[in-house]
Image (cartoon, grey):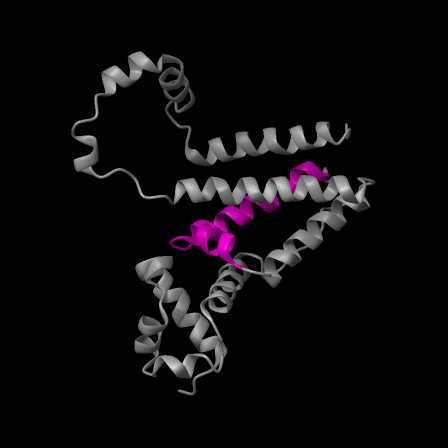
């Protein structure tokens, strides 16, 4: 099979899923493709270009089509849905948030921002405020997923952890977590609740009431 950029990116995404972002090296990628590392540079001249191509690929899987809100749909609800799609795209791949946050001039991320900002402007929100709202939502979403995908403490790290002492020292924190995650409530609910605060708060800051 001929080597082209699409094949390289497809294998790079597979390598990402297997080994995470730190495992995406030209040596490993070349081995998967059955070529020498210098051959890759004809198509992707450096690691930054490769990471951006991977970012576009994983975003394109969720954002193959994008459209503005329906005429009667509040822009806040539409923007919430857009953020939820972004989160799904990032969670679909190991280190997805790290890849997108490390990408440079991602065309798909730019297309998402373009649609979101132009949508808000179409709803009579000044461009400067639209940019702040969209940027806030995007960065919150990526940051939220970065935390979701961060490595969790292993058993050795937890074996000496004194939960009772922790709860005594930080009672409000523990009580809040326990209360929030009542039976049936998940991290998906947490994301949506936090996102609502972000969007409504950004709108209020911008002086937007509807």
Relative image position of residue 130 (x, y in whole percent): 74, 42
Q: Quadrant of the N terminus?
A: bottom left
- The quadrant where residue 185 appears: top left
Relative image position of residue 186 (x, y in whole percent): 41, 32
Query: Which residue appears farthest toward the right when viewing the image?
Result: 124
- The quadrant where residue 128 appears: top right
Q: Quadrant of the C terminus?
A: top right
- Total marks drawn? 0
Residue at 55% across, 62% down: 60
Relative image position of residue 59 (x, y in whole percent): 53, 58
Relative image position of residue 137 (x, y in whole percent): 61, 40
Vertical comparison of 153 with 205: above or below: below
Residue at 49% across, 75% down: 45
Vertical comparison of 173 with 99: above or below: above
Vertical comparison of 56 with 71: above or below: below
User: Which segment did they paint magenta?
Assistant: 75-103
**Would residue 135 be counted in the magenta stretch?**
no
Residue at 46% across, 56% down: 99
**Foreground pick, 63 / 52:** 52
Vertical comparison of 1 with 125: above or below: below
**Would residue 93 be counted in the magenta stretch?**
yes
- The quadrant where residue 12 appears: bottom left
Residue at 35% across, 65% down: 15
**Foreground pick, 78 / 140:** 140
Is residue 113 in sight in this rendering? yes
Magenta region, main secondary structure: helix
Is residue 210 in sight in this rendering? no
């Amino acid at each position: 099979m001929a080597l082209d950029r699409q094949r390289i990116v497809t294998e790079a995404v597979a390598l990402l899923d297997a080994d995470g972002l730190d495992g995406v090296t030209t040596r490993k990628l070349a081995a998967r493709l059955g070529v020498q590392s210098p051959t890759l540079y004809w198509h992707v001249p450096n690691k930054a270009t490769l990471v951006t191509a991977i970012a576009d690929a994983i975003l394109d899987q969720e954002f193959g089509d994008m459209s503005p809100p329906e005429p009667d749909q509040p822009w806040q609800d539409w923007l919430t849905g857009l953020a939820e799609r972004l989160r799904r795209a990032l969670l679909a791949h190991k280190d997805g948030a790290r890849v997108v946050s490390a990408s440079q001039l991602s065309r798909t991320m730019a297309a998402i921002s373009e649609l979101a900002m132009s949508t808000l402007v179409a709803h009579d929100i000044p461009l400067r405020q639209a940019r702040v709202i969209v940027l806030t939502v995007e960065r919150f979403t990526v940051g939220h997923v970065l935390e979701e995908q961060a490595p969790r403490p292993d058993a050795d790290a937890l074996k000496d952890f004194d939960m009772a002492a922790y709860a005594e020292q930080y009672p409000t924190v523990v009580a809040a977590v326990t209360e929030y995650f009542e039976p049936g409530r998940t991290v998906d609910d947490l994301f949506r609740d936090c996102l609502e605060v972000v969007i409504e708060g950004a709108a209020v800051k911008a002086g937007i009431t509807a």
